[in-house]
Image (tube, helix red, strand yellow):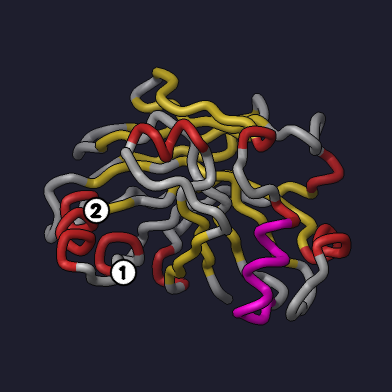
Amino acid sequence: MKIICIGRNYLAHVKELDNALPTEPMFFMKPDTALLPAGAPFPYPDFSKKVHYETELVLRICKTGKSIDMEAASEYYDAITVGIDFTARDLQSECKAKGHPWEIAKSFDYSAPTGEFKAICTLKHPEDISFGMKLNGSWVQQGHSRDMIFDFNTIVSYVSRFITLNPGDYIFTGTPKGVGEVHVGDKLQLFLEDEPMFEFEIK
């Protein structure tokens, strides 16, 4: 399975990091070793001193597709959850300054915790999905799918131009504003609509 991640997909987040606004989806990938086993704590990596959370809606691909038409894209994903794209922000800044790829800052082990998937058809508001994260009991990120720069169908169609999508692939669809730093001992709770999906601790 593949983990595909969309960057800079919420205007407020683009502004908070002072990044350029994309004109088409930009994506990178994580290996399957980025998944965090259910119930396990996130081990703070020894190669970074500034790890940030980025809470995101995550799509699950349900059938194989290549060069998918936008009008048919919704047939290729059937379930959704919420996850975190952990980012070693200090390493990412160094990579950007040198013009290097970001993999060491984005694709490290356990950098993509995700909850259990729910069928999209069972959601209360599938046309505008709310999600968020609490850090130590307080809301730090809350978002709505309506605020994405590129919607689900655009993302799936665009990515499939370059990479064949297969059943079981994940697509992280971008983070809203409110990204921030985690520390050892922090407790994170992830929500899809108003439902708690999973929680874990930073170790």
Please state which of residues 148 and 120 is positioned toward the viewer in this rendering.
148
Upstream in the sequence, badge 1 or badge 2? 2
Hey, which quadrant is residue 135 in on the image?
top left
Q: Position of residue 155 (x, y in %)?
A: 66, 59
Please state which of residues 159 and 123 is positioned toward the viewer in this rendering.
159
Q: Position of residue 85 (x, y in %)?
A: 42, 51
Residue 5 vertical position relative to residue 82 in the rendered view, above or below = below
Relative to residue 149, is residue 21 drawn left or right? left
Q: Position of residue 56 (x, y in %)?
A: 52, 44
Q: Locate the C terminus and report the quarter of the image it occupies.
A: top left
Q: Is residue 161 magenta?
A: yes
Residue plotted at (57% across, 58% down): 24
Q: Position of residue 137 (x, y in %)?
A: 40, 20
Please state which of residues 120 and 25 is positioned toward the viewer in this rendering.
25
Q: Is residue 155 magenta?
A: yes
Give the magenta range.
154-165
Residue plotted at (86% across, 63% down): 75
Residue plotted at (76% across, 79% down): 64
Looking at the rendered structure, the secondary structure element under dot 1 is: helix
Hey, which quadrant is residue 144 in on the image?
top right
Q: Locate the N terminus and report the quarter of the image it occupies.
A: bottom right
Q: Residue type at mark 2: give it.
A: Ala
The 10 Å Cα crowd at callout 1, few under 14, some 14 to 19, many 20 or more, is: some
Relative to residue 1, is residue 127 drawn left or right? right
Q: Residue type at mark 1: give it.
A: Glu
Rendered image: mark on residue 88: 2
Residue 191 vertical position relative to residue 75 in the rendered view, above or below = above
Mark 1, residue position: 103
